Structure formats: structure tokens, C-alpha cells
Image: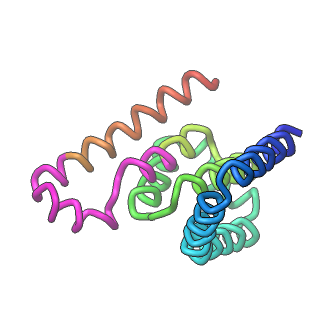
Amino acid sequence: MFNILLHFVSLIFLIMSFFKDKQKTIKALKIAWKSFSNILPAFAGVLALVGLVLTVLSADIISKIVGANTGIIGMLITSIIGAITLIPGFVAFPLAASLLEKGAGVMQIAVFVSSLMMVGIVTLPLEIKCFGRRTAIFRNFLSYIFSFIVALIIGVVVS
């Protein structure tokens, strides 16, 4: 219901914008379409990969690998996956919700999302180029440690 309301309000504002300035509205829609077209291939690929993984991995397998009972080992597994994976946030959070529904542990998913958002192994060469080797490695190291602290806090708060 809330999504329908948001779409309706957006449509009303779009119509108002169109009547106020037709050229700017059309230009904005063209820019939005171009941005959407640029994001769509990567987004579709990530969604397909996530769908495939969630289809192949049963709830039992997910629970055994990264369930609440896996403790620090499950957290290490998910933190490493999160640190080396480059997934946008708008895909990461629905993926995390799906993994939780399939039996993954809260702390394991918290460290996954935290390390995914804060640690950048894939982007490390670019970061080294911009900030220097020492700063980039130190920032990633602190972010990796902090992702565990975040997971522990979330684990305490949720349970």
C-alpha cells in the first residue's frame, strides 16, 4: 500500500512539473532514462546471480554455512565474501533479507553487509592510487575490524 502511495505522489509531482516547465521535465526524464539504462545491465546481472545462488542453496546449506550456530567461523566466511564482493547497496539489503529468511544468522549477515559496504578489496588499487598504500590499507583494515564490532552490537540488540 505504501509503495502505491509513493508511486501516486511521484506521478502527481511529475504532472505538476510537466505543467510548470515542459522542457525541463522532458530533459529530466531523458536523464533519468539514461541513468536507468546504464544501471540496468549490472543490476540485472547481480539479481540473476543472487537468484541463482538462492535457488541452488537450500535453507539447510545456508544454515550450515552461515547460520546462527556457526559463530565466528560463519562470521569470517561472510566477512571475507563481503570484503571481496562488489555489490551495490540496493541489491545487498534485499539479498541479506533473503539469506536471513533462508536461515542465515543475524550476526553473520550483519558482518557480511558491513564488510560489503565498508571494505573494498576490489577497489583497493584505485584507493591506493588516490590516497596512498598505507592509508588505503589502514582504512580497509579498520573497516574490516569495525564490521565485526557492528555485527556484535546488532547481535546483542536483536537477541
Q: Is residue 21 visible?
A: yes
Whether residue 128 sits left or right of residue 83 in the image: it is: left
Q: Looking at the image, is 95 positioned above or below residue 68? A: below
Q: Quadrant of the N terminus?
A: top right
Q: Nearer the viewer, residue 142 or 156?
A: 142
Q: Is residue 103 visible?
A: no
* Residue 119 included in the magenta stretch of the image: yes
Magenta span of residues: 112-138
Q: Which residue does the image show at 81% across and 44% down from the upper left?
A: 3
Q: Nearer the viewer, residue 67 or 46?
A: 46
Residue 159: give x, y in percent of width and height.
64, 24
Whether residue 152 sits left or right of residue 144 in the image: it is: right
> Count of labels shown?
0
Say which quarter of the image contains residue 157. top right
Say which quarter of the image contains residue 58. bottom right
Q: Looking at the image, is 51 positioned above or below residue 10? A: below
> What secondary structure predominates along the stretch shown in magenta?
helix
Residue 2: give x, y in percent of width and height.
83, 38
Q: Nearer the viewer, residue 23 or 64?
A: 23
Q: How is the image coloured?
A: rainbow
Q: Which residue does the image show at 39% across and 63% down from the upper left?
A: 84
Q: Which residue does the image show at 66% across and 68% down from the upper left?
A: 47
* Residue 116 included in the magenta stretch of the image: yes
Q: Which residue does the image show at 60% across and 64% down from the upper left?
A: 32
Residue 10: give x, y in percent of width and height.
75, 46
Residue 35: give x, y in percent of width and height.
55, 68
